[in-house]
Image (cartoon, rainbow, N blue to C red):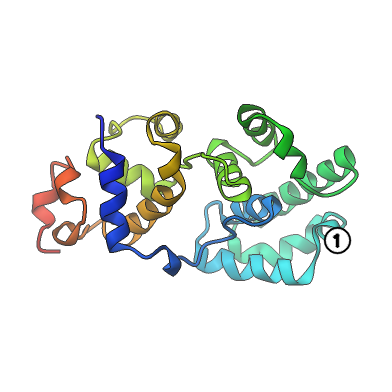
Amino acid sequence: MKKDFKIITRKLAKTYDLREMDFPPLIRDPLDSLVGVILSQNSTDKVTIPIFRFLKSSYSYEELSRLNPSVLEKIIRPCGLAPSKSKRIIKILRKLKQENEKVSLDFLKDYSKEDAFNYLTSLEGIGPKSAAVILSFGFGQPFFPVDTHIYRVLKRIGFAKEKESRIKVQENCEKLIPDSLKHDLHLLLIMHGRKTCKPSNPRCGSCPIFNECNWKFKKKFLTT
């Protein structure tokens, strides 16, 4: 269903302050975004952020690429799935070193938007959502990653169908949300999903986009 994302963005921006987000690296080194998204898979920011910051303060990416995966595995164990995550991170860093003589993603700046996306999704452990995060926050490209919170909110407000896959929803967002809104709206919807449009007991009574929402159960939660 068509939605006016300018209105939704404006209303959410009046409610949430993006400066409150303690989020793994936003627009900084693209490698920060890559390592951050791998660490965050099936984990939480509360766990991921301190470990990411420890890695950044302890190792350069050149040094990290030379680590034995078992060493990295011990460091990132609290993030979960440490054996696979450690191997994927080091494998990608070594691949970048081998292909470019340095551990960097800067070469993607010369790629088209589509080619950069395809390159990233060719890397083990990097799916469409993770690639969109890296390109959006690492390169400032107009992508719209759809995480669990955004997926839930978009289904409730009626933009996405209940059984529509997250990848399909992300593809639709890429096409229909204006580029100028994508970065802020992505973060605002995450905050909205965390603070108000929760999986259970959503706070519909204080929802800033209540009138834009088509969720059939919203009136049941007006007092929460």
Q: Is 9 or 154 nearer to us in this picture?
A: 9
Position in image of residue 92 (x %, y %): 76, 44
Compared across the picture, whether 197 is left or right of 87 comes to: left
Position in image of residue 177 (x %, y %): 38, 36
Q: Residue at x 47, y 40 (%)?
A: 144
Check the image and name the residue furthest to the front.
180
Q: Is residue 25 above or below residue 129?
A: below
Compared across the picture, whether 38 is left or right of 201 comes to: right
Q: Residue at x 86, y 45 (%)?
A: 97
Compared across the picture, whether 77 is left or right of 154 comes to: right
Q: Quadrant of residue 180?
A: top left
Q: Is 35 or 13 nearer to us in this picture?
A: 13
The amino acid type found where label 1 is placed reads: Glu
Image quarter (top left, top right, bottom left or bottom right) of the N terminus: top left
Position in image of residue 46 (x %, y %): 51, 68
Position in image of residue 10 (x %, y %): 29, 52
Number of disc labels: 1
Compared across the picture, whether 35 is left or right of 5 comes to: right
Q: Residue at x 82, y 43 (%)?
A: 96
Q: Residue at x 89, y 41 (%)?
A: 98
Q: Is residue 144 above or below residue 85?
A: above
Image quarter (top left, top right, bottom left or bottom right) of the C terminus: bottom left
Residue that mark 1 sits on = 63
Q: Is 6 or 153 nearer to us in this picture?
A: 6
Q: Secondary structure at mark 1?
A: helix
Mark 1 packing: few (<14 Cα in 10 Å), some, or many (20+)? few
